[in-house]
Amino acid sequence: MLPTSPEPAAELTANPYRAPEAQVPRFYKVVDHYPVRGSPAEVMRFRHARTEGNLKALGIFLLLLGAAWVVQSQYYMSIAYLHVTGSVSAPWIVKPFYVASIAMNFLLGIAAIATGYGLLWRRGWSRGGGNLSGFLLRRILVDAQRLWTPE
């Protein structure tokens, strides 16, 4: 049987999963502090400015972190060089574990600097490095928290 009035047809087209209307008090006023005006491209860019800012901040952080890693590994490389030449006695520095960790810190520093540069200047190739850096940073923080948390 076909509906004869417009009301049943409106009920059929209504979304039953729709969220209920918000009960906003009359004294509450929504203020848009940053009204979006301009061309559609500018509106789109404004809406994505937060993501862009986060990527640039992560890029700056990775540049600083990479510089710290490189400086730290250069310090230990100089100790290893001085030990090999006989100026300093540091027999622990030439063990394979320390040599590998110094090389890994140096390579991670170079990778962090490259990824930070790419994220700061929004290069397409840096997306994978940014994801990897974020994952590694999260793992480092979670492992550090687990290691230093008293049992």
Image (tube, helix red, strand yellow):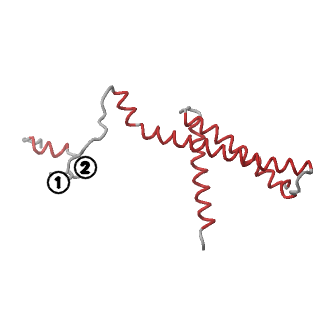
Residue that lies at the very extreme toward the bottom in this rendered image: 151
Residue that lies at the very extreme toward the left in this rendered image: 5
Residue that lies at the very extreme toward the top in this rendered image: 39
x%, y% of residue 18? 25, 49
Q: Quick one: label 1 or label 2, which is nearer the N terminus?
A: 2
Q: CA distance from mark 1 to mark 2?
A: 21 Å
User: In which image quadrant can residue 46 be found?
Assistant: top left
- Viewer-proximal residue, 6 or 145? 145
Q: Looking at the picture, which amino acid does disc 1 mark?
A: Pro
Residue 18 appears left or right of 144: left
Q: Residue at x 62, y 55 (%)?
A: 140
x%, y% of residue 22? 21, 52
Q: Looking at the picture, which amino acid does disc 2 mark?
A: Arg
Q: Which residue is mark 1?
A: 25
Residue 79 appears left or right of 68: right
Which of the numbered marks, if any, corresponds to residue 100?
none
Circle nearer the viewer, 1 or 2: 1
- Viewer-proximal residue, 98 or 65? 65
- Report helix, strand or loop for mark 2: loop
- The N terminus appears in which quarter of the rendering? top left
User: Do labels 1 and 2 touch, CB within 8 Å?
Assistant: no
x%, y% of residue 60? 56, 41
Label 2: few (<14), some or many (≥20) within 10 Å? few
Q: Which residue is mark 2?
A: 18
- Viewer-proximal residue, 130 or 32? 32
- The C terminus appears in which quarter of the rendering? bottom right
Label 1: few (<14), some or many (≥20) within 10 Å? few
- Report helix, strand or loop for mark 1: loop
- Is residue 93 positioned above or below 129 on the image? below
Q: Residue at x 82, y 50 (%)?
A: 79
